[in-house]
Image (cartoon, grey):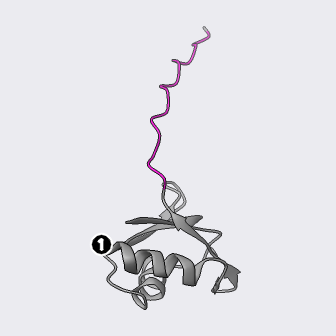
Amino acid sequence: MNIYVGNLAYSVTDADLSQAFGAYGTVANASVIKDKFSGQSKGFGFVEMPNNAEANEAIKALNEKPLKGRNMRVNEAKPREDRPARPPRRQSY
C-alpha cells in the first residue's frame, strides 16, 4: 500500500519516515518529496508498505502523531490523477 504522509517538519528525512513506519511492519520505500531546484523538503512524503494489514495499522497509529515537532497527517495515498496538458505559452515579439 502506498501511504501519503503530510504536514512533515522540513527536517524529516527518508530515514526518519522509514524508522517511524518500520515499527509497524516492513517498509519497502520511504521518501520525502523535495523541491527539485532548492532540495528543500516540500513538507510531505510517501511510504510504501507491502503488507496492507501492517500499513493500515501504521496509518491508524501515526495519524496526528508528532514527528520532529509536527503532527503528521497519514492516510492511504490516492492514485495520481492525469492532469491536462498545459497550453503552449504565447510568445510575444
Q: Residue at x 56, y 65 (%)?
A: 44
Give the magenta part as a residue range.
Answer: 78-92
Q: Where 89 sits versus 9, above or below?
A: above
Q: Residue at x 51, y 54 (%)?
A: 37
Residue furthest top as drawn: 93
Q: Residue at x 42, y 83 (%)?
A: 15
Q: Where 37 sits versus 20, above or below?
A: above
Task: Answer whether residue 7 is magenta in the image.
Answer: no
Residue 49, given in percent of the width and then of the height, sits at 35, 73
Q: Residue at x 49, y 33 (%)?
A: 83
Q: Where 83 sits versus 56, above or below?
A: above
Rendering quarter of residue 8: bottom right
Label 1 element class: loop
User: Circle 1 sits on which residue?
Assistant: 50
Q: Is residue 92 visible?
A: yes
Rendering quarter of residue 43: bottom right
Q: Amino acid at mark 1?
A: Pro
Residue 7, given in percent of the width and then of the height, sits at 65, 69
Q: Residues within 10 Å of mark 1 (few under 14, many from 20)?
A: some
Residue 35 vs residue 30, the one in the foreground: 30
